[in-house]
């Protein structure tokens, strides 16, 4: 199946899934100057934050579960800002399990459900593992330890694969979706799930350039049935408590998860790798506060591809505008990275000033839907 054979989702299709399009965010980047685009986006973010909080609906369930810690180049994770000796940092990838009341009933969304075994074929990480030669398997256990797989995370919540309605990712770097959605050779692990993805992200995988292809898992989308893909051309609401907001930059089709929780609006993506990325003037990571003070930077990019750097900067400001300050530490924003910087003895000098860690609100409900 060609990725271009997947058709854009119609309004009728979206409504049948409990989804509606949003008008607040997507037309804010038409101004001629970057500074004007930033101000327009900030204003739209403030309006959307007020709108979503005004709906006064929180998610039925929200949980983040640790999957795997991976080494990641410091020069990418804290672009231009960190002044530490270690060339690598540790980021921990998590799956977000969210349940949402909609007009079409309770919906279960998995955000960033990484197939951590298949994803090892991503060229950048495969090449990194190969540098260890015959010791790669032993070393891998130390620098890329596995906490859980998605299947285990789901089971811990008392949910079954049949309960999952949607899967989504802020972008498709490293992702192999064939196990989850099925292909010609593979039965879908989530028989009822559909992928929610921005059309530009989906189409981009059809014609990657070398700076991009190093980060996409080869063949990871091949053979996925077209009816499993919900192609989006705008930001959306799922019910009244969750949104997927277009945040282009890190990739052309990047989007962010916004969930209304008992701790306010939590916003998630991999635009930044830590709370420090969104509050650099409060960071204790060597170099970050100084860099922000000297340059005036409001955010520090996660810049492994820099497809659209200025857009990513604006998107990160949008994310923290929507999120607002964290109740846990008001010096930082309620932006929960999908892959979060964590302290690791092997990578000295890199400790986040504030860490969200795993989160849980509410109680999950299973319906064990039949395929």
Image (cartoon, grey):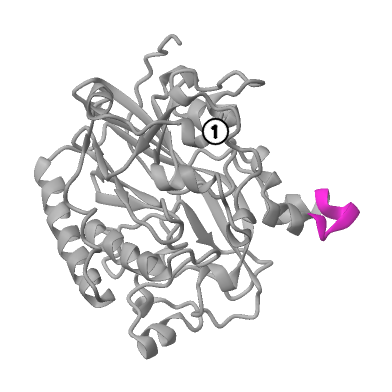
Residue 348 image point, x, y percent: 63, 73
For label 1, the SS is: loop
Above/below status of 36 relative to 137: below
- Which residue is farthest top? 370
Q: Residue at x 11, y 41 (%)?
A: 55
**Res. 151 image quadrant:** top right
Residue 256 image point, x, y percent: 35, 50
Q: Does residue 65 appear to the left or right of 346 in the view shown?
A: left
Residue 371 appears in view: yes
Question: Which is nearer the eye, 152 or 42?
Answer: 42
Q: Circle 1 is placed at which residue position?
A: 2
Q: Which residues are magenta?
A: 130-137
Q: Residue at x 27, y 45 (%)?
A: 235
Q: Is residue 11 magenta?
A: no
Residue 117 appears in view: no
Q: Residues within 10 Å of mark 1 (few under 14, many from 20)?
A: few
- Which residue is farthest right? 134
Q: Residue at x 43, y 55 (%)?
A: 252
Residue 285 image point, x, y percent: 49, 77
């Amino acid at each position: 199946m060609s990725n271009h054979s997947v058709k854009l989702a119609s309004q009728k299709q979206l409504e049948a899934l409990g989804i509606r399009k949003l008008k607040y965010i997507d037309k804010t980047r038409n101004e001629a100057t970057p500074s004007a685009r930033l101000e327009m986006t900030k204003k739209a973010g403030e309006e959307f934050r007020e709108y979503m909080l005004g709906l006064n609906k929180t998610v039925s369930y929200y949980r983040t579960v640790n999957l795997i810690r991976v080494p990641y180049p410091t020069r990418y994770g804290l672009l231009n800002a960190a002044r530490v000796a270690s060339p690598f940092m540790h980021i921990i990838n998590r799956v977000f399990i969210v349940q949402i009341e909609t007009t079409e009933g309770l919906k279960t969304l998995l955000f960033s459900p990484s197939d951590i075994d298949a994803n090892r074929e991503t060229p950048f990480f495969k090449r990194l593992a190969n540098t260890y030669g015959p010791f790669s398997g032993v070393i891998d256990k130390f620098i890329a330890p596995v906490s859980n797989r998605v299947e285990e995370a789901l089971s811990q919540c008392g949910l079954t694969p049949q309960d999952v309605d949607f899967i989504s990712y802020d972008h498709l770097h490293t992702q192999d979706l064939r196990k989850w959605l099925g292909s010609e050779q593979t039965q879908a692990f989530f028989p009822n799930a559909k992928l929610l993805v921005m059309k530009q992200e989906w189409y981009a995988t059809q014609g990657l350039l070398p700076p991009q292809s190093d980060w996409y898992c080869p063949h990871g989308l091949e053979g996925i049935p077209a009816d499993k893909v919900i192609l989006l051309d705008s930001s959306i609401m799922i019910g009244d408590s969750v949104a997927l907001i277009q945040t282009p930059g890190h990739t052309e089709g990047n989007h962010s998860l916004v969930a209304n929780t008992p701790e306010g609006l939590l916003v998630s993506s991999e635009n930044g790798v830590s709370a420090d990325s969104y509050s650099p003037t409060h960071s204790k990571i060597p170099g970050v506060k100084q860099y922000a003070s000297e340059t005036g930077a409001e955010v520090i990019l996660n810049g492994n591809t820099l497809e659209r750097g200025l857009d990513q900067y604006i998107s990160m400001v949008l994310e923290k505008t929507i999120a607002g300050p964290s109740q846990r530490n008001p010096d930082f924003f309620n932006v929960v990275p999908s892959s979060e910087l964590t302290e690791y003895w092997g990578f000295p000098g890199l400790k986040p000033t504030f860490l969200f860690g795993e989160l849980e609100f509410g109680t999950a409900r299973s319906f064990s839907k039949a395929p």
